[in-house]
Image: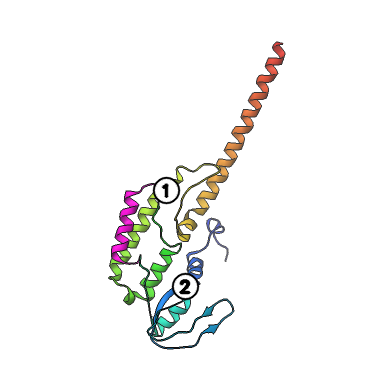
Amino acid sequence: MALPNHLKNTFTPAEIEFLTENETITILPRYTMNGLDLITDRIPKIRAMQRVEVPIWFALILKSQRKCSIVPPVWLSQKELMELYDFEIAEPESFSQLPKNWLEIAKLFFENAPDDLTDEAHKLKSLVQDLKEIRLIKIKKGLKLLNESHLQLDNLSLMEINEIRPFVVLAMSKLTKLNEAAVAEEGQGDGAEEYEYDDDE
């Protein structure tokens, strides 16, 4: 099935989640196993009740088998999310420093490991949604400053960049063409003035 035109230059949410699952995360295993050498990854030796970093996809498998707890990142707590939200409100021209895949990681926890969170999942979901929305408002304001050669939007996540990419690419393409047309018209105007000056002489 062909993708809609507006999705051809972007990742789908499922593809971004897939990429995220190749990142590492800390787990607290409930059993011991030797390390594994895979084609693209290496699973380290695991000892029961000793924290270790593993790929997220592997952590999700162990979690589904009740063989580990997944340690949530520091920012995925009620206190930290509230502080991040306050920062977004207080600093209209900058974005808080969150991981490039913070939205996907939060979603993975809410769907697969809500019992491992330090605060109630529904409260964290609400805070994540609030944080996402305030950042989106700031992104839209930032796009108003778009010119033909530059757009400064630091600390955006992959999902946030992915959502605005089609608009930005199209807008910058149009702005570039308008700028080139203006430069060309200005050049023609300069030529006409020089020609008239020669006639007077």
Residue at position x 54%, y 45% in the image: 172
- Read off the residue under disc 1: 140
Residue at position x 38%, y 55% in the image: 96
Could you tell me residue 70's position as x and y percent?
A: 38, 77
Q: Are marks 1 and 2 in contact (CB under 8 Å)?
A: no
If the image is split into quadrants, where does the N terminus sit?
Answer: bottom right
Could you tell me residue 199's position as x and y percent?
A: 71, 13
For marks 1 and 2, give the one nearer the viewer. Answer: 2
If the image is split into quadrants, where does the C terminus sit?
Answer: top right
Residue 168 located within the stretch drawn in magenta: no
- Read off the residue under disc 2: 24
- Using a 10 Å C-alpha cutoff, classify the residue at mark 2 as few (fewer than 14 neighbours), some (14 to 19) or many (20 or more): some
- Using a 10 Å C-alpha cutoff, classify the residue at mark 1 as few (fewer than 14 neighbours), some (14 to 19) or many (20 or more): few
Quarter-wise, where is residue 41 in the image? bottom right
Q: Main secondary structure of the magenta part?
A: helix
- Judging depth in this view, the residue of 157 and 11 nearest the camera is 157
The stretch of residues the image draws in magenta is: 76-93
Quarter-wise, where is residue 68 in the image? bottom left
Could you tell me residue 8's position as x and y percent?
A: 56, 59
Amino acid under disc 1: Lys
Residue 114, numbered circle = none
38 horizontally vs 187: left or right: left
Amino acid under disc 2: Thr
Cα distance between the residues tagged 1 and 2: 31 Å
